[in-house]
Amino acid sequence: MFHWSSRRDAPAEARVTIERRVADVYTFYRDFANMPRFLGDVMASEQIGPGTYRWAIRGPLGVRLHSTVRLVEERPNQLLRYETTAAPGMRTHWTVRFAPGSDPARTDVYEVLRIPFGKVGRAALTLVGKPPGAEVAANLRRLKQLLETGEVTDTEHAVAGKFAPVVPADHRRPR
């Protein structure tokens, strides 16, 4: 199951069902070192303090950025809330909910992204090729792929080449 919303006046949101138990999905997501493995533009995540992480991000046109993110609420196996540490009014906020799916081996993950400046912020990001709703949806699809198959093949809304398929040595083109 996969669903996402892109109403201009609403926060970006998406949901996905993952064929893994809630504790497995939550534990994987809660380890912020795993974020670069499925977030399309986060290239590295380093813990710099309790619940605080420094992300290296590759933005539009290859611009390299850094962002500090902190965990602001945590309910094991249920909820994670985190936000950037920018000035109030300039922060990006994420809420990720985890719930048992239709059977114990499934987890429903629901993510809401709130960006600064509402409609204007969404429009600006869309103009530079980073539509928030589509990005959240692509990130959750990659999380699902990674946890169900061990690899990511979805490259939508990701840095070019970040999730390139691994080609076995005997199938590479000769140089």
Image (tube, rainbow, N blue to C red):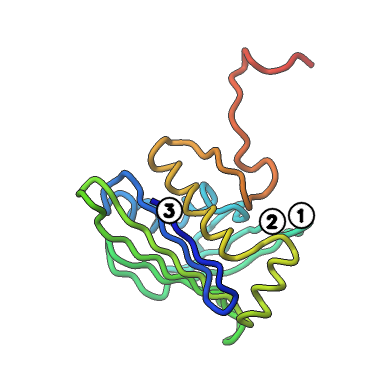
Q: Amino acid at mark 3?
A: Phe
Task: Answer left or right for 41 relative to 81.
Answer: right
Percent from the top left, x then y, of residue 71? 43, 70
Percent from the top left, x then y, of residue 159? 67, 49
Q: Total number of numbered labels?
A: 3
Q: Residue at 58% across / 61% down in the picture?
A: 55
**C-alpha distance separating marks 3 and 1:** 29 Å
Percent from the top left, x then y, of residue 32? 46, 57
Instruction: Please say if the residues under marks 1 and 2 sit with CB atoms less than 8 Å apart.
Output: yes
Q: Residue at 61% across / 44% down in the picture?
A: 155
Task: Answer left or right for 121 relative to 78.
Answer: right
Query: Does 85 sit above or below residue 162?
Result: below
Instruction: Please say if the residues under marks 3 and 1 sit with CB atoms less than 8 Å apart.
Output: no
Q: Considering depth in this image, is 144 or 72 the residue closer to the camera?
A: 144
Closest to the camera, between mark 2 and mark 3, is: 3
Q: Which quadrant is home to the C terminus?
A: top right
Q: Which mark is residue 58?
A: 2
Provide the residue designation for mark 1.
62
Percent from the top left, x then y, of residue 126? 69, 66
Q: Residue at 36% across / 74% down in the picture?
A: 73
Q: Which mark is residue 2?
A: 3
Q: Amino acid at mark 1?
A: Gly
Query: Does 145 sit above or below residue 133?
Result: above
> Is tag 3's residue or tag 1's residue first in the polypeptide sequence?
3
Query: Does 61 sit above or below residue 174?
Result: below
Q: Residue at 52% across / 39% down in the picture?
A: 152
Q: Please, what secondary structure does the residue beneath circle 3 have?
A: strand
Which residue occupies the extreme left position in the image?
Answer: 104
Q: Which mark is residue 107?
A: none
Query: Does 37 sit above or below residue 128?
Result: above
Q: Amino acid at mark 2?
A: Arg
